[in-house]
Image: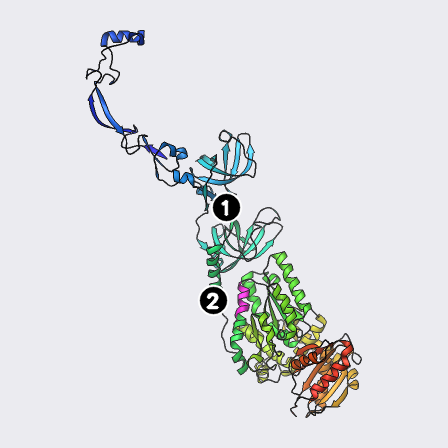
């Protein structure tokens, strides 16, 4: 940029003084003239006025001058149009850029949030050639701003798609940009984006429709539709869906993926009356900015995920000791929800496992919907029963497959798997190892006798045995209290579930009586037992299905009339089938008195029980055991229901440790393939069919060697 020098008024020099012309001695007339150099036109003037002195031009005086110090003789003062610095020297005047800036010029890259108002004449910009015409080449400075390089300024026309650097020569009427191509050896790129305050999702209201805003957060889901790509962004306020359109069905911003931190500029719109942002610009944040955003979001999530430290529904010395672990697990579950991490809730397929899972489910679903929207339950939650009282390889295979499919289809994170009424034993380890390969986090709330080896695979573990308790404090009791820590609003809805759990698992702990008493204003003991039986019966037919809705009705979480009719019908059917099974089995039970005084009852459920129907072998053994305990009320009783490659153990008054017995059998009977577990006095064992006689004989010996209570 230049302007006339104010000191020399554009002359480039300053007048110091005036002197008498040395050539004409101040007369202003020349002493001699060469007539050969005078034209006929000037002869008359010469004859009349004489010849003018060539040096002083007839003034008789000459000016003594020196170059102007302000403009250094140029007449104009120049300043760099990039940095504004005064420019000296003709060699530095090309494009009116100082030598420093010419060595490293600034070239602006317009973010998609910018419009014509953000463009300035005289500055350099990055652009992409979008099309060509006979009169010039069109260049896009971003998706909204376009200019023309006129053919008069283009020596070699670039190809469509070429990246170019252009100087904005002028901005004409109507917003038309006149561009000049520039070739620059060295430059510094400056990312230029519209100055907007950063909002969090909680601050975005429907009333802001049409406003341009900026958000910063973590991408928690990428979903490709037949139209735009939907990016779900999680920040300290919650979440907000952001729609980016490239073309119908084409993935927008393919370099942006789940768990990346981004900055998004866009317009607030409404879709199905829910706030959505139409993306104008999306940038990946890295380095210090990424760390700052993550820290800001995590700080708020830590505060929001704090569990409710509230009194338990009943008095329990064991649960008071477990409270720190229970609060930790509750917080981890809430953090997963706030991070929009999918949750898979795995539970044992019996009354205790089902009530455990339903208690957690009732607590977390409102939070999942609040954070993820009306359809979030479909994408972010799954409840699945496990047939065995541990996390089987079949279970983890389904869970990993489910997670990988959702990651591919919906761009989701790997899930948090919550194991309830299972997950504490060595049998769970193979599945846990597979889950950790895919960075799947695992939490356990269980009351089976725990093995320390599992803890290395878990981010939280609640088990009464860790504080001196036993299986009498059921998983249903623990999960109901954890659910209340997650969401206290569900307390009244789920307060009867621990009682159903207690009667279903036949708990004799003091807590069982207290929870049953807590529910007595709504349900009799008979009601609770019927609910537990209905759960076991219906889950047998559901197999691996969660039975959503049906299970809710059994537990009286829907219409009460439907609940009463359904439970009555299911119990009628279940009791009929149990009676038929007992009529078949009891006459085939073989009883022996062991050395320790215990009565051991043995039934071959493979050959002397109905197969592939209710009750299954485990429950059949339990029902047989109950009948035999009533026949021997004052004696220790052990009942073993066995098949070709398994044995189910039920006991009363026999102080054995089934997990320890399983480990001993595995070590002593090489080649028998022994594994299994459960509670201390209730459990199951698996083995190879060819070693059944050896395993059962050694099992009987070990039972005969333990102490009894009677």
Q: Which residues are magenta?
A: 331-341
Q: Quadrant of residue 635?
A: bottom right
**Residue under numbered circle 1:** 112
Query: From what the image shows, is residue 29 above or below residue 426?
Result: above
Query: Does the magenta run of residues contain 332?
Result: yes
> Does residue 620 show up magenta in the picture?
no
Q: Residues within 10 Å of mark 1 (few under 14, many from 20)?
A: many
Return the disc, 2 or 1, that comes first in the chain's sequence: 1
Of residue 147 and residue 641, the one placed in the foreground of this image is: 641
Q: Is residue 45 left or right of residue 105?
A: left
Q: Residue at x 49, y 64 (%)?
A: 301
Asked if residue 193 lies left or right of residue 225, the reply is left
Q: Residue 293 location in percent, x, y?
A: 47, 58
- SS label for mark 2: helix
Q: Would residue 272 be found to the left or right of residue 587 on screen?
A: left
* Label 2: how many Cα within 10 Å (few below 14, some 14–19, many 20+): few
Query: Which quarter of the rendered picture does the C terminus lie within?
Result: bottom right
Residue 434 drawn at (x, y percent): 64, 66
Q: Quadrant of the N terminus?
A: top left
Q: How is the image coloured?
A: rainbow
Residue placed under numbered mark 2 in the picture: 303
The x and y percentages for residue 645 are 75, 77
């Amino acid at each position: 940029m230049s302007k006339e020098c104010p000191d020399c008024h554009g002359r480039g020099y300053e007048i110091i003084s005036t002197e008498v012309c040395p050539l004409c001695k101040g007369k202003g007339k020349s002493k001699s003239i060469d007539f050969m150099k005078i034209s006929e036109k000037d002869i008359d003037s010469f004859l009349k006025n004489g010849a003018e002195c060539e040096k002083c031009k007839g003034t008789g005086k000459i000016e003594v001058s020196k170059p102007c110090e302000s403009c250094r003789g140029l007449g104009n003062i120049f300043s760099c149009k990039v940095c504004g610095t005064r420019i000296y020297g003709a060699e530095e005047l090309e494009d009116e850029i100082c030598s420093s800036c010419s060595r490293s010029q600034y070239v602006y890259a317009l973010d998609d949030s910018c419009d014509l108002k953000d463009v300035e004449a005289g500055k350099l910009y990055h652009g992409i050639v979008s099309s060509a015409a006979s009169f010039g080449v069109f260049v896009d400075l971003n998706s909204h701003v376009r200019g023309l390089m006129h053919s008069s300024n283009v020596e070699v026309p670039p190809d469509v798609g070429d990246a170019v650097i252009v100087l904005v020569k002028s901005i004409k009427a109507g917003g038309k940009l006149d561009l000049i191509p520039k070739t620059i050896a060295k430059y510094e790129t400056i990312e230029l984006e519209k100055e907007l305050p950063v909002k969090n999702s909680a601050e975005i209201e429907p009333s802001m429709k049409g406003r341009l805003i900026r958000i910063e957060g973590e991408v928690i889901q990428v979903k490709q539709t037949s139209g735009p790509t939907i990016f779900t962004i999680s920040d300290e306020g919650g979440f907000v869906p952001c729609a980016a359109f490239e073309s119908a069905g084409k993935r927008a911003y393919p370099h942006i993926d789940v768990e990346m931190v981004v900055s998004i500029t866009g317009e607030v719109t409404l879709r199905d009356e829910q706030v959505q942002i139409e993306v104008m610009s999306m940038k990946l944040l890295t380095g210090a900015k990424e760390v700052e955003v993550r820290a800001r979001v995590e700080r708020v999530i830590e505060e929001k995920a704090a569990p409710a430290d509230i009194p338990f529904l009943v008095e329990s010395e064991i649960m008071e000791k477990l409270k720190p672990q229970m609060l930790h697990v509750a917080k981890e579950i809430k953090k997963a929800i706030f991070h929009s991490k999918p949750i898979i809730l795995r539970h044992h397929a019996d009354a205790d496992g089902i009530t455990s899972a339903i208690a957690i489910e009732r607590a977390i679903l409102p939070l999942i919907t609040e954070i993820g929207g009306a359809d979030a339950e479909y994408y972010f939650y799954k409840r699945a029963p496990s047939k065995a009282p541990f996390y089987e390889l079949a279970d983890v295979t389904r869970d990993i497959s489910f997670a990988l499919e959702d990651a591919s289809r919906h761009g989701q994170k790997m899930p948090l798997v919550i194991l309830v009424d299972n997950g504490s034993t060595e049998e769970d380890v193979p599945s846990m190892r597979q889950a950790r390969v895919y960075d799947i986090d695992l939490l356990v709330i269980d009351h089976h006798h725990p093995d320390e080896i599992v803890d290395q695979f878990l981010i939280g573990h609640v088990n009464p045995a860790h504080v001196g308790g036993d299986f009498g404090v059921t998983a249903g009791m623990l999960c109901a209290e954890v659910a209340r820590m997650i969401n206290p609003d569900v307390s009244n809805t789920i307060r009867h579930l621990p009682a159903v759990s207690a009667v279903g698992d036949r708990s004799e702990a003091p807590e069982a009586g207290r929870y049953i008493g807590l529910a007595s204003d709504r349900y009799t003991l008979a009601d609770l037992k019927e609910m537990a039986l209905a759960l076991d019966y219906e889950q047998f037919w559901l197999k691996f299905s969660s039975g959503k809705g049906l299970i809710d009705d059994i537990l009286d979480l829907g219409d009460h009339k439907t609940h009463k009719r359904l439970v009555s019908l299911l119990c009628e059917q279940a009791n009929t089938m149990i009676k038929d099974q007992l009529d078949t089995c009891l006459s085939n039970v073989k009883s022996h008195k062991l050395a320790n005084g215990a009565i051991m009852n043995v039934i071959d459920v493979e050959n002397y029980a109905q197969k592939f129907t209710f009750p299954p072998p485990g429950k059949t053994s339990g029902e047989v055991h109950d009948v035999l305990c009533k026949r021997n009320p004052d004696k220790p009783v052990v009942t073993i229901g066995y098949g070709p490659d398994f044995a189910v153990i039920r006991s009363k008054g026999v102080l054995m440790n089934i997990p320890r017995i399983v480990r001993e059998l595995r070590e002593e009977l090489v080649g028998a393939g022994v594994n299994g577990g459960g509670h201390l006095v209730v459990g199951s064992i698996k083995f190879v069919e060819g070693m059944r006689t050896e395993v059962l004989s050694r099992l009987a010996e070990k039972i005969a060697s333990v102490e009894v209570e009677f």
